[in-house]
Image (cartoon, rainbow, N blue to C red):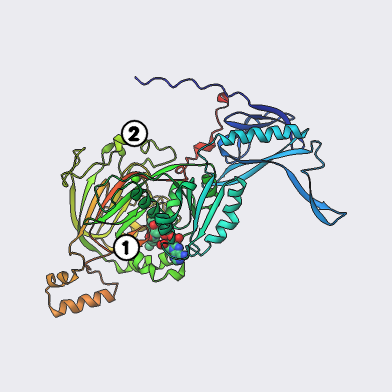
Amino acid sequence: MDKPPPPKPPLLPLLCSQLSLQHRVNEVTLTSAFLSWRDVETRPKRTSGSIYGPLKAAGSHYVPVCEIISVQETEEDCPNTDVGKWQKVPHNPAESNQHAFTVSYVERTPKHRWRCSEVTLHCTDRTLCLQWVQAIREQLSLLTIRPKRLLVYINPYGGKHRGKRIYEQKVAPIFSRASISTDVIVTERANHARDHLKTEADLKKYDGLVCVGGDGMFSEIMHGLISRTQRDSGVDQDRSDETLIPCGLRIGIIPAGSTDCVCYATVGSNDPVTSALHIVVGDSQPMDVCSIHHNNTFLRYSVSLLGYGFYGDVLTDSERKRWMGPARYDISGVKTFLSHRYYEGTISFLPADENVGTPRDKLQCRAGCNICRLPTADKQVYKDKESGSDTETDGAWQVIRGKFLAINAACMSCACPRSPKGLAPSAHLADGTADLILVRKCTRFDFLRHLLRHTNKDDQFDHPFVEVYRVRQFRFTPRYEDGDSELELREAGGSGHARFFSQICREHPACTCSLAHSSWNCDGEILPHAAIQVRVHCQLIKLFARGIEEQSVFEEPYALGAM
Ligand SMILES: CCCCCCCCCCCCC/C=C/[C@@H](O)[C@H](COP(=O)(O)O)NC(=O)CCCCC
Ligand SMILES: Nc1ncnc2c1ncn2[C@@H]1O[C@H](COP(=O)(O)OP(=O)(O)O)[C@@H](O)[C@H]1O
Ligand SMILES: [Ca+2]
């Protein structure tokens, strides 16, 4: 039988004083868990305020210490009429207590957005004020998970080209308030960040990396960090059966791209301030990563969408329209939908164990997810039976052949503003599996119904032409070998006519005949091969995030008896 948890020690006040807040006397208390204040001039009400502000119960406000961003003695600038210059004076001369300190803390607002809020408390003398500042700082210094030094990469061309401005105006001031020092690199070319991380960066100097950009930029940084970690540990990425070494540094994502699904699916919004605050409080979210090989050559890693057919064709078309910014995906999406191409091939996959659920579970991965917290042994990345290596499971490979409009795999939900529940709504961030979604050839109307369900609450898998599997590994082989589209023509008769019509079909996307190959869209990059082997590596990287919080995390006031 499990032992009962040890009793929690009572949280003794470290400091408790009567301080003034907006001219009213408040009892202010600091424990190792909370900073709280309570207006002692009014009779306590039952509960008050919005669910998003500091936790309020019976007129008291509670801010968890782990959500305090900073504390500083408060001085306010006001004009000195004698010299026409600005000078520092105590915060509010009208206040009877002239010494004050300001605490900045995380405040939750709707749609999973976090904001930086402040409370200024006035003291009767400076000694008391400094005592408060010091006591709060001491508590903050115990939060060793918080980063102190970060290496920031900014893609100035991602999304709407606003990365640099977003960082300078919204993020840098928060880092500076939280006393985080940064080295900032504005990239000058594609793969600049990846190459810098792989070969040059002195990673020992940093507690984390920050990516300002979209999913493509995140992918660059992830590749740089994973490759560097494997090289430093003597692991050969080209071997598809290698056990990869998890990366030590966490990555923070400041969304400034076109899709931003890695940020959205791990934080719950694509808001730069929210992401900056998750970095400041030192959140940590492990994440699965797929490795993709062609024969025994490593191609790429993927965390979000690995899509063949529809999403591969959307990406290929959209790359020519980069100048349009994020709208390129909408235009190419419609164009690709109209072309209605399908592709033939074989998928073999190794299903995951039942204890990690299925892609159609109602339960979704949320902060503190129980499935992602299962002991690693229960989520072990099983080895390939067919390869003859050590087998730790009875799981057998399954094989599916057919004509597909889309073959998608996702290690995580891929929720994004275009599709708030995502491509794989029940996929888990850190369970060692990916959800494999096969969309078989169907009518345009049915495919449209399927696509539209990504944008509303209906189940996009509830169609007879859609199959979903939770897998640890899979392979895809196109019916015709890479570069062998001539075969298709020979099968179709091999005549000059067939070649002629095939050419017409390529040039007229409205034609629904089969082409030999699509491309794989790998987190927004096109892969050079159609035949690939994919394997999920459980919790290979970590982000400065915590998963999407359930509303109830901040709806319920903290159990006051425990304080
Ligand atoms: C005709 C109605 C179509 C509605 C379809 C809505 C489906 C949306 C699913 C979105 C899944 C997004 C998965 C994320 C992929 C990104 O990794 C990738 C690169 O992002 P970035 O670097 O930020 O540019 N984005 C895409 O491949 C865009 C796919 C958009 C498809 C319409
Ligand atoms: N300075 C740069 N110039 C051109 N391309 C860059 C630069 N820095 C990064 N990139 C590349 O830009 C691509 C898209 O970046 P991303 O930030 O994901 O924007 P988007 O979401 O709009 O695609 C990535 O593949 C990345 O490698
Ligand atoms: Ca997963």
In this rendering, is residue 151 above or below 480?
above
Q: Amino acid under label 2?
A: Pro
Residue 21 position, x and y percent, is 73, 37
Q: Is residue 64 visible?
A: no
Q: Quadrant of the N terminus?
A: top left
What whole-number distance in Å separates the C-alpha atoms at marks 2 and 1?
A: 35 Å
Q: Quadrant of the C terminus?
A: top right
Q: Element at badge 1?
A: helix
Location of residue 495 (image quadrant): bottom left
- Residue 259 position, x and y percent, is 44, 58
Q: Position of residue 398 (x, y in %)?
A: 18, 47
Q: Secondary structure at mark 2?
A: loop
Q: Which residue is mark 2?
A: 375
Front residue of 336/383: it is 383
Q: Nearer the viewer, residue 158 or 41?
A: 158
Residue named by callout 1: 312
Task: Give the amino acid at mark 1.
Answer: Gly
Classify mark 2 as within 8 Å of ligand 3 or not, answering yes or no: no
* Residue 361 x/y as whole percent: 33, 42
Q: Quadrant of residue 73?
A: top right
Front one among 231 and 442:
231
User: Does 496 appear above or below 382?
Assistant: below
Report ligand 3 position as a quadrant. Answer: top left
